Amino acid sequence: MTTLSLLDADALASSSVTAGEPTWLVERRRIAARRFADQAWPDSRFDEFWRSTPFDVRFDVEREIATAAAGAPSAPAGVLS
């Protein structure tokens, strides 16, 4: 069984060769595996700051988002309040 800690670019390329995949695909997999290995794991303490930001801080909830054009009919009473 292959675990993530044993899955490196060479092991992936070896599996691809064993499976009879074309050389160009083996090389693309090797490059992708190295690129993946070079990336840091996400850290939710820093990468997902938006999850803990209160909605009213992120957006001006009191801002008017639409206005009626001059001379346009108004909405019935109670619709926009």
Image (spheres, grey):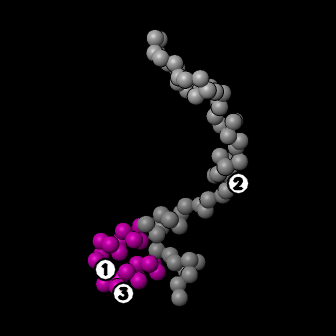
Q: Residue furthest front?
A: 77
Which residue is labeled 2 in the image?
Answer: 45
Main SS, magenta residues: helix
Q: Label 3, on which residue?
A: 18
- The total of numbered circles placed on residues is 3
Marks 1 and 2 in Cβ contact (< 8 Å): no
Looking at the rendering, the stretch of residues picked out in magenta corresponds to 10-31
Q: Nearer the viewer, mark 2 or mark 3?
A: 2
| SS type, badge 1 | loop
Three-letter amino acid code at disc 2? Answer: Arg
Dot 1 amino acid type? Glu
Q: Residue at x 52, y 18 (%)?
A: 74
Q: Mark number for residue 80? A: none
Furthest residue to the top?
Answer: 71
Location of residue 9 with respect to 1 vertically, above or below: above
- From the image, tell me which residue sits under label 1: 21
Please name the amino acid that badge 3 sits on.
Thr
Residue depicted at x 32% and y 72%:
25
Image location (x, y in percent) of residue 64: 59, 24
Residue at 53% of width from left, 88% of height from top? 1
Front residue of 15 and 51: 51
Tell me if 52 is positioned left or right of 38 in this view: right
Task: Determine crowd level at label 3: few under 14, some 14-19, many 20+ residues with C-alpha closer than 10 A.
Answer: few
Using the numbered discs, state the Cα–Cα distance from disc 3 to disc 1 in whole angstroms.
Answer: 8 Å
Mark 1 or 2: in front is 2
